[in-house]
Amino acid sequence: MQKWRMLDALPLDASADLTVRAQRLDLRAGEVVCREGADDRRLFVVESGAVDLFHEGNGRRRLVHVARSGEHFGEVAALDGGHCATTAEARVASRLAAFSPEALGLWLAAHPQAAEVLLRALSRRVKELDDRVATTVFDDVPGRLARALVRWGAQYGDVLEGSCYLRHGLTQAELASLIGAGRESVNKALRNFAARGWITQDVSGSLVLRRVDYLRRRGNLVAAAQRAR
């Protein structure tokens, strides 16, 4: 069975019952599965590939998250009956599992304990948004970037001999968008981290987090000091 993070806490029968209710979608790179503001209340799980979630306007886009294999999106619209919160576009060729509100309703009726899983998922998303707002308000750009690198390393990195290899596949402009900063500021912070020996970068843009402990400290100390004022 495909590993979906949202199913980790569920009994095997409930997980299996959900997977058979899915509609599978195969997307080409650059294909949009739902657009911000559209009346689409499906819940999506990324089975393979990656999907960009972003806001767009005035010919520009602001990347807010990259949903990778095992992650889900669209839970807010699925649960509150609203509209798509962001545009979702396949970053690479991807396969998604999509669940209509009717399929979710039947599944929840058959497995009432699963409602807690969806509520936890929604709670995590709210906490992530709260943390993003707080760090944007209180942290400087290096602090925001350090915290993001630590978080992404824990989620997507590969640990080898004390270092964390983070093959994120993002441009510096996209990194900047994800933390609400300018590309030049992110470039300067990355160069500073590299000069200190905390990270190294290769020609593809992948990062090796050499001193996660220092990055974690840099991401937390500035916020703590400023909030204490």
Image (tube, rainbow, N blue to C red):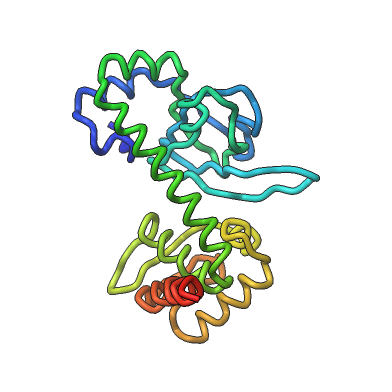
Instruction: Determine the residue located farthest toward the front in the rendered image.
Output: 229
Residue found 59% across the figure and 31% down from its top? 84
Q: Which quadrant of the figure has residue 220?
A: bottom left
Q: Which quadrant of the figure has residue 155?
A: bottom left
Residue found 24% across the figure and 26% down from its top? 113
Using the image, determine if residue 81 lies above or below residue 197: above
| Foreground residue among 75 and 168 | 75
Instruction: Determine the residue located farthest toward the right in the rendered image.
Output: 58
Using the image, determine if residue 50 lies above or below residue 157: above
Across and down, in percent, residue 154 comes to 36, 60
| Foreground residue among 135 and 99 | 135
Across and down, in percent, residue 130 comes to 48, 52
Using the image, determine if residue 22 lies above or below residue 170: above
Q: Which quadrant of the figure has residue 175?
A: bottom right
- Please state if 133 lies on the left or on the right of 177 as rendered: left
Across and down, in percent, residue 189 comes to 57, 76
- Please state if 109 lies on the left or on the right of 215 as rendered: left
Across and down, in percent, residue 89 comes to 60, 38
